[in-house]
Image (tube, rainbow, N blue to C red):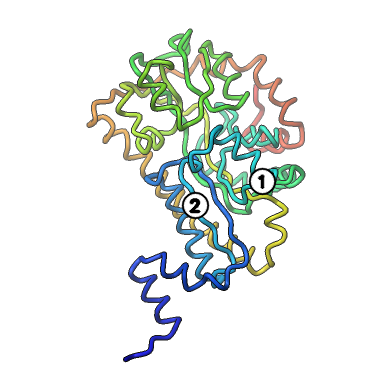
Amino acid sequence: MVKLSRRLVLQSALAAGISAPVKAQYSRAVRWRARQYVNQPVANPLYKALDAIWSAVRVETQGRLDVTVYPQNNGLPGSDPAALKLVQSGELEFFALMGGLLSAAVPVMDLQGLPFVFKSSQQVWQLDDGPLGRTLDRECEAKGIHRLRGGLFENGLRQMNMREKAIRSVDDLAGQKIRVPDGEMFRDVFRTLGADPVSLNINQLYDALKDGRVDGQENPLIIVETNKLYEVTKNVSVTNHMWSGFNMIANAAFWNKLPADVRAIVDKHVARQVKVQRKATLDLNRKLEASLVQRGMAFNRADMSGFQQRLKDGFYPRWKKQIGTQAWDLLEKSVGKLG
């Protein structure tokens, strides 16, 4: 009988894509077991990136850090807001969350979703790599949340997706029940634009559209695709009204107790997979208009001239006060005066 080395068994298992035996190989070596929540289904590139990160970390740390990824927040009642509270309390170690929801704990994070500010995803990434990003890091750390450096995943520019009515101008939003994430800035944007915002977690969105409890929703096209919203909506109005992405965060106390070499390994694989996920997401968002049309959806380009005008007088001054002048000034240095 040929006696195989532990390394050869591990390499063979990895090559075959077998994860359970690899985990068994490490069972005695594991020192930290943790969980990673994400609100997206397994079909989304974000889930795939997170799964790849923690598989690679498990291998490179020889099982010292073993993190399991749970799609759709593992069915947690309360979804994203509840998961954020678990991160702060230390009951959940890792989470991926957009700034407009992370702002419930760290108000400055609303800056990532300011409407009609960012022209492209690349502009946001560049800002996050500089002084503005480091300001966001410090604000998160002060609230017990570690924002992983280089861990800003892509979601895309947001569009308006309706059951029946096409949004062709800002006046078409009047009285429309628009589902928005459970963040005050999202609600304020759509109230100011004349709509009736309804906050629902992403895991409730499909049924709310199907049942007619909301008239539409706003998200990048990738969310329409991976959450199968094309089954319950007919129209997409291209508005590019906000950028959205996901911040890779950790409970700060848990993160800081990990050895420096383990943290460095995590940072390395996060940065590597962020590049992969950003490209996959941007590529998919670009291709989706054609494929969603083939599924029977109608697209139009909205006349955006009235949207920003509605926000100019009251909205931006309100949110400058909420977000804080330090981060706001850093933003305006790059994008120009707001309001």
Q: Which residue is mark 2?
A: 69
Q: Quadrant of the C terminus?
A: top right
Residue at the (46%, 30%) spot, across then down: 158
Which amino acid, mark 2? Val
**Residue 19 location, x and y as percent?**
41, 65
Residue at the (58%, 32%) spot, across then down: 113
- How packed mark 1 is, by other alpha carbons closer than 10 Å (few <14, some 14-19, many 20 or more), is many
**Residue 72 location, x and y as percent?**
47, 41
Q: Is 339 placed left or right of 38 in the picture? A: right
Q: Nearer the viewer, residue 79 or 55?
A: 79
Q: Quadrant of the N terminus?
A: bottom left
* First of labels 2, 1 by sequence position: 2
Residue at the (65%, 25%) spot, across then down: 338
**Quarter of image, res 209:** top left
Question: What kind of element bears circle 1?
Answer: helix
Residue at the (35%, 21%) spot, across then down: 210
Q: Which mark is residue 133?
A: 1
**Residue 104 location, x and y as percent?**
66, 32
